[in-house]
Each structure stands twice: as structure tokens, then as C-alpha cells.
Amino acid sequence: MPVESHLPLEELKRLERAEKNADRARRLRIVILGWEGWAAPTVAMGGGLSRRICQRWVARDNEQGLAGLDDLRGQKSELPLTEEQQAAVCERVDAGPNDKDGVCSLRGKDVQRILAEEFGLLRSLSSVYWLLHRLGDSYLRPRPRHRKNDPAAMQAFRDEWPDRIKAIAAEHPGQQLRVYFQDESRFGQQGTTTNVWAQRGSRPTAMRQTEYEYLWVMGAVCPETGHAEGLLSPQLNTQIINTFREQFSTTILEGEHAVMLWDGAGFHTAKALRVPANVTLVQLPPYSPELNPIENLWHSLKSHYWSNRAYADYDALEAAAVTAWQTAVLDEDLMKTVCAAPYVERATSD
């Protein structure tokens, strides 16, 4: 392979020794061997490359010097859509399937058809997935939402929250307000499964119990401090809620006042409900678990501690609930993350 004398042989060898990029060092070695008179087939055999590749790198060096040894692959690919089309595709995909699509979830082949029929863009299935990822989309499992969920009511609650917390602070002058979120979750032998690591292409199995023993886990978490309190009970009613709230009120420090946000469940609005003097209740809009970050706590406990297992009886359920609570929920730094509530500003009193 004839090599043009852009640089002396010793300089090429020095550059090869100093080169930190393994691919570029190998290209320099190809040029050096060509300079020393080695034939392309011999160089290719020694480097584990094809003869044509070796000849191509030498030709680039001859034409451009060392700049010809740069790897130009991996340059940013241009999307086959204008900015307006990109926005339209994102809007169409994010809106989900319509009646014409005839499916409950858009798969890659559905998006491929939509691109062809609605945007005049013919693409292979792999290109469709590439395009979706470039547009910022991923195939995610949605969070359940009640059909009566009212986004306007949720936004109004967020907008009104600063004034509401100021009004509560005015009612309790000289006290530090602490915002807590409260909820209950049932944990039992009607088991759930969660993700596991497994070999690609395999279909792993996991234990999913289908018996009927259960208990209730009640909790209240302050996203600001990470403080959490809980109670386990075999049943759930207003009397149990009163017991939990009375116990919770004893954990509030002197000089502080708890503002507890919770949903409108029947036992949260009963006439027999008792409210301690150091607790103020605020009811969330109906069907809006998105406003209650303690929902994330139940998901976390089920995903990391309670799934893929079987429990012999109530005692086993109780032991598992206590262990998970002590391991995770008493970790205040973890609770600040799991139960973070960005829409609630830090509660302070004047």
C-alpha cells in the first residue's frame, strides 16, 4: 500500500504510542505498516480487518493527512420531519389511539401506519422506534386515573394552596406549620408482582398469592422533614382513624401545628370524626390521588418489599409490613424523596 509522506515514520510511531483512542491508534498502525512496505492482505490479517478497510484508511491519510483518520460516524442524524410536523406527531401519539385506530394502545406498527397515512412518511419499523425516541417518547405504563378525575379542580387546589396555608397560619400564630399527607393502603394475600432482572428474551416467573387475608396500613408523611407515623389494623373505620389521629397528634412537637391533607373517603368525613387541637384537616379534590404523594409510598413499598411473595397468615403480613416500615419509612431522607410534593410550598408562620 503506497503511503504519502505527510509525516516522518518516527513521528507517526510517536503519535501511535501517545494516542489514547484505541480505534485511532489502530488506524495509525495501518498507515505505519503500509509505510514499512506491508501488503494490504497481510496488514488486514494481522489487524483482524478486511483488506478494503485497510486500503480505505491509507487512502484517506494520503488525501487528507492525519485528519483523514478521524471517525466521522455517529454524526447527529436529521429528523425526517419539520418542526411543525414533529409537534403534530408528538401531539397525535401522546393523545393515544382514536376510534379509527381500533386498539387501546399504539404499538410501533400503529405509529408506522399513522406516519404513512396522516403524515405521508414511509419508514421501517426500526426507524419508527428511532423516531419516537428522538422525539422524546418512551413506551410507559400509565398511572391509573379515575374517570371522574377533574384536572381543573386539581389545578384550582394548587392555585389556592398558598392562600389556604396563609389562612391556617393566621389561625395559629406563633406556631410552625408542618404539612402532612395521609392515606391508607390495604396489604394482603391478594399479591402483586413487580419487575425482576432476568436474561433478555426470557419470561421469568414470580409468586403471586391469591388468598384473602389482609390488613390496613395507615400512614402520614411530612415531605419537608421526612417525619412519618403509621398504624396497622385488621379493619378500617372512623374509630380506627380517630385512634390513628390521636396517636399521630402526640408526635407533633410543641410549638408546631400539623396541616393534614387527605382524600374524601367516607370515614374521613363521618360525624364521629375527632380532630386533635394541634391538627388541621384539608380535604383534597375528589378522585385526585396525584395530589397526595403518599400514594408513591404505597407503590414503593409494594414494588420493593411486598411483591413476588406469599404470606402464610395475618401474622406474616403484619411482620412484613412492620419490617418494610422500619426499613424504608423511618428513613427520613428517603421519605423526603418518595413523598416529595413540589406543589406545596414550605409551610411557615409569621
Image (cartoon, rainbow, N blue to C red):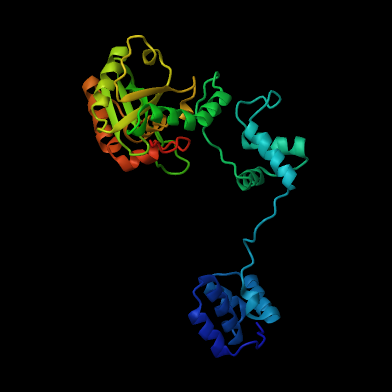
Farthest-out residue, right: 120
Residue 313 seen anywhere in this rendered image of the structure = no
Task: Return the residue nearer the eye: 151 or 100.
Answer: 151
Q: Residue reaching furthest top?
A: 271
**Can you give x and y, in whole percent of width and height, for residue 3 in the image?**
65, 84
Q: Is residue 100 above or below residue 338?
A: above
Q: How many marks?
A: 0
Residue 80 image point, x, y percent: 73, 49
The image quarter containing residue 113 is: top right
Residue sitting nearer the eye, 317 or 285: 285
Q: Residue at x 44, y 36 (%)?
A: 341
Q: Quadrant of residue 178?
A: top left
Is residue 89 or residue 228 the one in the foreground? Answer: 228
Q: Quadrant of residue 339?
A: top left
The correct choice, above or below, for 238 with respect to 75 in the image is above
For the C terminus, the quadrant is top left
Q: Position of residue 229 (x, y in %)?
A: 28, 30
Q: Is residue 293 visible?
A: yes
Expressed as whole percent of the image width and height from the top left, the position of residue 14 reads: 51, 85
Left or right relative to 187: residue 82: right
Q: Is residue 117 above or below residue 246?
A: below
Q: Can you say which quadrant of the picture contains the N terminus? A: bottom right
Foreground residue among 220 and 94? 220
Is 145 positioned to the left or the right of 7 in the image? left
Q: Residue at x 37, y 28 (%)?
A: 259
